[in-house]
Image (cartoon, rainbow, N blue to C red):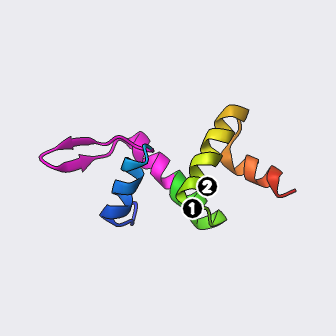
Amino acid sequence: MLFRSPRTLRIYDEEGFVQPKRKNNVRYYSQEDIELLQKIMKLMDKWRLNIYGVNALLKFAEKLGMDEEEVLELMLE
């Protein structure tokens, strides 16, 4: 379970992190969406990043071909 408010999940949707399917005004998240949301929440909770920091980190890590945690640890060395 994600344990975030519906508004928070809508923000992640609005920011383009996930694109849940919708039916009768209900959002349905794929397993891939849920895994990404869990990763986002872990980064926010563990590293105290805001949504914009997470977005920048995800893009940077993808360009480097590295895991987000590895990038953060390298930055803190």
State which region is magenta. Answer: 17-38
Instruction: Give the label on residue 37, or none.
Output: none
Instruction: Give the label on residue 53, or none.
Output: 2
**How far across and down, in percent of the image, does residue 28 sit?**
26, 46
Q: Residue furthest left?
A: 24
Crowding around mark 2 (Cα neighbors within 10 Å: few <14, some 14 to 19, many 20+) is few
Q: CA distance from mark 2 to mark 1?
A: 5 Å
**How far across and down, in percent of the image, does residue 70 sit?**
74, 47
Question: What residue is drawn where x is 74% and y is 47%?
Answer: 71
Q: Residue furthest right?
A: 77
Disc 1 target residue = 50
Which secondary structure, mark 1?
loop
Q: Is residue 20 left or right of residue 48?
A: left
Using the image as rendered, state which of residue 40 and residue 57 is in the foreground.
57
Disc 2 residue type (three-letter): Gly
**How far across and down, in percent of the image, does residue 65 sit?**
70, 32
Using the image as rendered, state which of residue 3 and residue 8 is in the foreground.
8
Q: Give the quarter of the figure containing the N terminus.
A: bottom left
Labels in figure, total: 2
Q: Is residue 72 left or right of residue 41?
A: right
Question: What residue is drawn where x is 73% and y is 34%?
Answer: 64
Question: What residue is drawn where x is 49% and y is 54%?
Answer: 38
- Asked if the residue under mark 1 is in contact with the one under mark 2, i.e. CB atoms within 8 Å, the reply is yes
